[in-house]
Amino acid sequence: MTEIFKVENLKKKFNRSGFQLSVDQLSLLAGSITGVVGENGNGKTTLLDIIAGETKANGQFHYFGIEANSHTNWLELKNNIGFIPQRIPRWYGTLEQNLVIKAALEGISADNIDGELDKLLDFLGLQEYRKLNWTEISTGYRLRFELARILIGNPRLLVLDEPLANLDINTQQKFLSDLKKLLAKKDYPLAVILSSQQLHEIESVADQMLFIKKGEVLYNGNLANISLDEEHVYELQLNDRDGHDTETYFDSMGYKVCIVGPYYQITTKQSVSIFLKTLSDNDMEIKYFRNLSNSTKRFFNN
């Protein structure tokens, strides 16, 4: 696969706090999704800011096969990077108006704008929202709109800083599905890197993972190579289900079930992605979900 981004010996130190981020090596490949997992304040956002060209750092950087140095035209380089920060900047006007402006800035001719927007809005399920403004859509649709706005520019690298934060489980799954479809659909090389505080949010889509603690990379590689806890504990609430039928189903699947108020606490050896897919395949709509497992705690304890 084509290497979209590579860095070696990355170092970033903040003199005031003394915090330092160190990454020996990181490579992002076309057609792949890289997940960065760590608790708040451990360096995830700093790393993504550096990759997106928003923050300077020491190291050997290569973007799209070309070494980045003091002579690099960073404005041109960043035109190939789509960056969505934790807090999406507010826009004014309708979604459609903002996308038309972005398309014009990207050099798309007036004759082709409508057709290009229709394809993009159809792909991301935004057609019925195109005439709405910021205050009229949910956080999840604001995120998908921001993705649409960025995709107009045909970036080769997508950098997403905790995009799933504050989204319900169904919206998270929809957004991750959009990313996978995007990588499968694109006819040009594209790599994605995204961060999360929770492994379960991104394990189903990530091809490789970085675990970061106190600015140090504890693990960099394929998730399949990590030995995680055998049992997982999930807490969930379902929409419009008969309680007796639900318990019967859980029992038939061999899950250990504990009812705590309105919630089911399920103990199983299934990973989050498999567990959620199993529920979806059985037409169970999730209203609330939380992973109570300690599967990655050992990376961040002590």
Image (cartoon, rainbow, N blue to C red):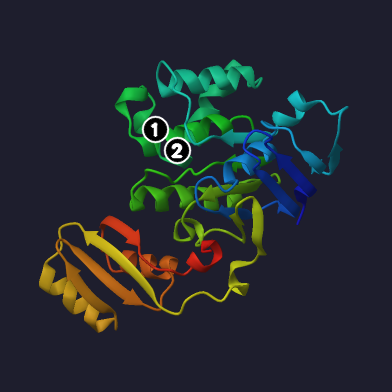
Callout 1 touching callout 2 (CB < 8 Å): yes
Relative to 99, say whether 229 is above or below.
Answer: below
In the rendered image of this protein, does residue 133 appear above or below residue 296? Answer: above
Q: Position of residue 152 (x, y in %)?
A: 59, 30
**Classed neighbour count for the residue bearing mark 2: other residues with Cα under 10 Å, few (<14), some (14–19), many (≥20):** few
Quarter-of-image position of residue 287 = bottom left
- Quarter of the image for residue 74 reads top right
Tell me where residue 262 sits by quadrant. Answer: bottom left
Quarter of the image that includes the N terminus: bottom right
In the image: residue 24, left or right of residue 104:
right
Q: Nearer the viewer, residue 15 or 181?
A: 15
Observer-nearest residue: 157 or 56?
56
Name the residue beneath numbered marker 1. Answer: 127
What x and y, as percent, mark residue 29? Answer: 72, 53
Which labelled disc corresponds to residue 247? none
Q: Secondary structure at mark 1?
A: helix
Q: Give the labeled residue for mark 2.
A: 122
Residue 167 in the figure: left or right of residue 211: left
Q: Position of residue 202 (x, y in %)?
A: 50, 56
Q: At x 63% / y 46%, what residue is drawn?
A: 186
Q: Earlier in the sequence, mark 1 or mark 2?
A: 2
Q: In the rendered view, does 40 fall on the left or right side of 26?
A: left
Q: Amino acid at mark 1?
A: Gln
Residue name at image x 63 percent, y 30 percent = 153
Residue at image position (45%, 32%) is 145
Q: Amino acid at mark 2?
A: Asp
Disc 2 secondary structure class = helix
Q: From where the camera sits, is residue 132 visible? A: no
Label 1 crowd bin: few (<14), some (14–19), many (20+), radius 10 Å: some
Cα distance, mark 1 to mark 2?
Answer: 6 Å
